[in-house]
Image (tube, rainbow, N blue to C red):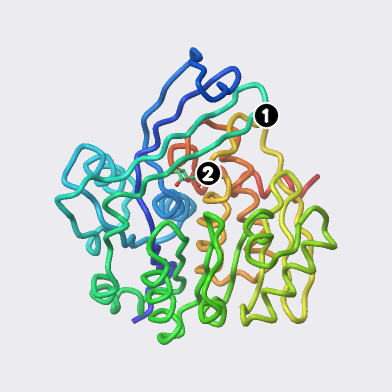
Amino acid sequence: MIAKNRITVLGSFVADLTFHVPALPAWGETRMGSSFVVGPGGKGSNQAVAAARAGGNVSFITKLGQDSFGEMARELYREEGIDTEFIPTTSHATGAAAIILDEKRGENAIIIVPGACFELTADEVDLASASIAASRVFIAQLELPVPVVEHGLRLAHEHAVTTILNPAPAMLLPETIYALCDYITPNETEAATLTGIEVDSLASAERAADRLLDRGAGNVVITLGANGALLRNRELSAHIPAMNAGPVVETTGAGDAFNGGFATALAEGRGFEEAARFACAVAGLSVTRRGTAPSMPRREEVDALLALTAHR
Ligand code: RIB
């Protein structure tokens, strides 16, 4: 039976090691940072947390090491009520991401070593097939081996589950993957990598979106940072503005907030534009806080922001 609000997320967990610095060091230079935070991250895990806090009934598929970072992940999923039945373990180490956050410019640079989660196999995804089939939405990103991601999308597609591919980080993809995506949600950089079209305006975003539709994706969302998101399919072209929920503190994980919120809204049966507005509210709130998974807002906050913007 298809469970209400059920979402399966296939993706990475890594520990985020975030260094806040007043200015980036040049190669060969050592600089003093102002603070250092260790917390849960990884695009898949961040999206699972965003979806769960936004009201989704979430099952997460990844792989963890039997170490302190792996335990950090399990503790997070216990707190957030995320189903961990399909999270196997390995004797290899859980991965990590080094996030350098430039406090003045508000920009970041990230190096991720996915570690344990990159050992996840297609056979292990198959173990979750009944759970995937019982989901309303399946979402994946690209911090796992691409054949495993494609396998998960195919499985969900065969069970008529709505699929979302967030093609992050940016990389070229096999042509076979597009027809498995009911929704594909690149940011500007990822859209440019996938299509070869530089995305620096709404018109160029529309051209890139059309290229992705031509390849077989059902619907395209190009997230545009502070400019919101472009939505496009064969019948619709719409621009959804970003939602301002207060001063921007950290944008790392904003894309994950958007995707987790989008998955939840689609799982609740909302239409394309309404789901994107909900996702913009989740992302708008997340950037007002530090961290990635810890910055994801709860449902009450999202509903309050949406109610407020409806009256503006
Ligand atoms: O999208 C942000 C995430 O990208 C961080 O949490 C980091 O772990 C990298 O995977």
Q: Residue furthest right?
A: 203
The mark lying in front, picked from 2 and 1, is: 2
Q: Is residue 155 above or below residue 13?
A: below
Q: Is residue 169 above or below residue 252?
A: below
Residue at 60%, 63% in the rendered image: 185
Location of the C terminus by quadrant is top right
- Callout 2 secondary element: loop
Left or right of residue 3: residue 255: right
Residue at 31%, 62% in the rendered image: 61
- Ligand 1 within 8 Å of disc 2? The answer is yes
Q: Which residue is mark 2?
A: 253
**Disc 2 or 1, which lies upstream in sequence?**
1
- Ligand 1 within 8 Å of disc 1? The answer is no
Residue 47: horizontal and vertical position, in percent? 46, 53
Residue 104: horizontal and vertical position, in percent? 65, 21
The quarter of the picture where residue 25 lies is: top right
Q: Which residue is mark 1?
A: 247
Left or right of residue 206: residue 214: left
Relative depth, front residue between 82 and 290: 290
Q: Residue furthest front?
A: 28
